[in-house]
Image (spheres, rainbow, N blue to C red):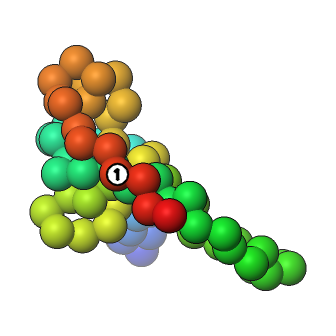
Amino acid sequence: MQNLIILSSIALCLLSACSASKQSAKLIQDCPEEKIVNKMPMVQTEGKDDKPNTYFIYKGERRELAEFDEKWLQEHCDVKETEVH
């Protein structure tokens, strides 16, 4: 009986991990409002990851390029690009 409980717990953990990785791998297939290209000079901080200079505005919030399905965007969207100086 105890072995069955342990096996059930392991199976549940594995299933949860699989579904979580599928959700995180899903890319946004929707058109963002705008693409921002930040051309302003920046100070690089040693040992610290700075945010990328190019990102989307999606539903009023900053979203990174990697969150979107790039191929889908190219086929379905005409995104306005704004350069910030």
Q: Residue at x 19, y 30 (%)?
A: 78
Q: Position of residue 74 (x, y in %)?
A: 29, 23
Q: Residue furthest right?
A: 46
Q: Quadrant of the N terminus?
A: bottom left
Looking at the rendering, which quadrant does residue 60 occupy? bottom left
Looking at the rendering, which quadrant does residue 77 occupy? top left
Mark 1 neighbour class, 10 Å CA radius: few under 14, some 14 to 19, many 20 or more: few
Q: Position of residue 35 (x, y in %)?
A: 33, 49
Q: Position of residue 20 (x, y in %)?
A: 35, 57
Of residue 22 and residue 58, the one placed in the foreground of this image is 58
Residue 28, placed above or below residue 77:
below
Q: Residue at x 50, y 64 (%)?
A: 85
Q: Residue at x 16, y 41 (%)?
A: 31
Q: Amino acid at mark 1?
A: Thr
SS at mark 1?
A: strand
- Side of 39 relative to 73 (left or right): right
Q: Which residue is mark 1?
A: 82
Looking at the rendering, which quadrant does residue 72 occupy? top left
Q: Residue furthest top?
A: 75
Q: Residue furthest front?
A: 85
Q: Residue at x 84, y 79 (%)?
A: 47
Residue 55 visible in the snapshot: no
Of residue 79 and residue 3, the one placed in the foreground of this image is 79
Residue 57 visible in the snapshot: yes
- Side of 9 relative to 28 (left or right): right
- Side of 61 relative to 36 (left or right): left
Tally the marks: 1
Q: Position of residue 29 (x, y in %)?
A: 20, 37
Of residue 61 and residue 7, the one placed in the foreground of this image is 61
